């Protein structure tokens, strides 16, 4: 007598057709590969915010697995949607990020290969073998939102640069756009902004006049295959890490930039301090400052409450 096979998992693939390295051909290939291992439904996004609605609806409909095919913006929306109405990770669908953006930080931080085809096949294998792992997330509450983030949040200078990169619209050559945005930002505003007051859950406090970057995992981003580490010890198995750039002048910025690109440990010194494994961080500014979440510019904010959400999400990987 043959052993009973478990029923195939029901999967929902949420496709962002506008993602920078997606295509119809690639979507077809991904759908074919996934169709071999799960009972698959495919839905496409039509606008910003739609992936979140589709994921929320998918969780309500009882899909076992929800996958994104897009970049980190789509990952952020899908994760927020699938966890919106559930009490814990165990009650939510399993998530898997199939990379189709330009940097795909979350997927790569999970250990998926840089090569997009190999990354997709790694997810297919994990689904076939029903391999999952649970990771932490970050949460940000401000005057405008209450959202989860998968890898980072930033207030100040890095968010201003991201705003510029988005305004160039990054179809190709993200590295060149990034360099151009950094130079334009330096020329126009320099690196010193209004001060940001920082309060840590440990009771310590500090002040920054450049930027504060909070991470849920490492690295902060990639330039091509090169990881850029601001908080090199940040991990899915720990609380949040934070980098506070205290006071910046141009030579210090150049040294910090060099240590980010060349070193693996991230910056540390009199101008830049990091803190590891925190439960929470509160940021306050007198004037609104640029804010980014998972690499998407979201506008300006004056007050952010960031906290770690341990064991928040189950991922197939
Ligand atoms: N059909 C659509 N039309 C326009 N925008 C969309 C559509 N679907 C999703 N979006 C938005 O596109 C934004 C960018 O998507 P995503 O991050 O997936 O790709 P990307 O920009 O290519 O990735 P990366 O940031 O890694 O380069 C997201 O914020 C998402 O809300």
Image (spheres, rainbow, N blue to C red):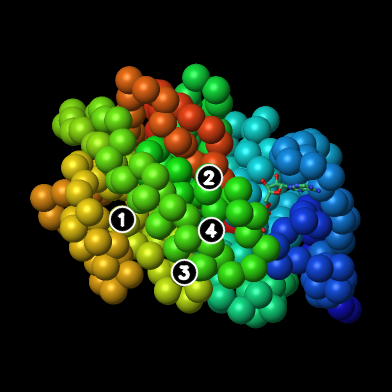
Residue at 11% x, 50% y is 270
Mark 4 → mark 1, Cα distance in angstroms: 15 Å
Please state which of the two labelled residues, at mark 3 or mark 1, is closer to the viewer. 3
Who is closer to the viewer here, 115 or 103? Answer: 103
Picture coordinates of residue 2 (x, y %)? 86, 78
Mark 4 → mark 2, Cα distance in angstroms: 20 Å
Ligand 1 within 8 Å, label 3 CB: no
Query: Which residue has dot 1 on it?
Result: 231
Who is closer to the viewer here, 171 or 213? Answer: 171
Element under disc 4: helix
Q: Quadrant of the C terminus?
A: bottom right
Query: Which residue has dot 3 on it?
Result: 223
Residue 106: numbered disc: 4
Query: Which residue has dot 2 on it?
Result: 163
Q: Are marks 3 and 1 in contact (CB under 8 Å)?
A: no
For label 1, the crowd category at 10 Å Cα-Cα, with few meaning under 14, some 14 to 19 and many 20 or more, is: many
Q: Quadrant of the N terminus?
A: bottom right
Residue at 41% x, 31% y is 289
């Amino acid at each position: 007598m043959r052993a009973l096979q478990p029923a195939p998992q029901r999967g929902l693939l949420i496709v962002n057709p506008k993602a920078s390295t997606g295509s119809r051909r690639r979507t077809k290939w991904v759908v074919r590969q996934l169709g071999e291992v799960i009972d698959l439904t495919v839905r496409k996004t039509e606008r910003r915010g739609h992936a979140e609605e589709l994921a929320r609806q998918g969780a309500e409909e009882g899909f076992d697995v929800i996958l994104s095919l897009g970049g980190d913006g789509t990952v952020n929306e899908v994760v927020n949607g699938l966890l919106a109405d559930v009490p814990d990770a165990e009650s939510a669908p399993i998530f898997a990020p199939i990379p189709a953006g330009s940097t795909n930080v979350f997927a790569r931080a999970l250990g998926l290969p840089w090569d997009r085809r190999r990354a997709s096949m790694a997810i297919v294998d994990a689904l076939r073998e029903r391999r999952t792992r649970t990771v932490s997330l970050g949460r940000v509450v401000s005057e405008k939102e209450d959202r989860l983030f998968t890898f980072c949040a930033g207030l100040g200078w890095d968010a201003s640069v991201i705003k510029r990169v988005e305004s160039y619209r990054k179809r190709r050559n993200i590295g060149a756009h990034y360099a151009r945005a950094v130079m334009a930002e330096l020329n126009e505003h320099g690196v010193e902004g209004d001060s940001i007051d920082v309060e840590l859950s440990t009771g310590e406090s500090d002040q920054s006049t450049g930027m504060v970057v909070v991470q849920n995992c490492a690295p902060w981003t990639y330039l091509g295959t090169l990881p850029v580490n601001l908080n090199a010890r940040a991990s899915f198995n720990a609380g949040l890490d934070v980098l506070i750039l205290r006071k910046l002048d141009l030579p210090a910025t150049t040294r910090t930039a060099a240590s980010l690109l060349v070193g693996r440990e991230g910056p540390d010194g009199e101008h830049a301090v990091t803190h590891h494994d925190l439960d929470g961080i509160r940021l306050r500014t007198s004037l609104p400052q640029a804010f980014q979440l998972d690499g998407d510019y979201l506008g300006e904010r004056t007050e952010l409450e960031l906290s770690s959400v341990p064991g928040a999400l189950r991922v197939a990987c």
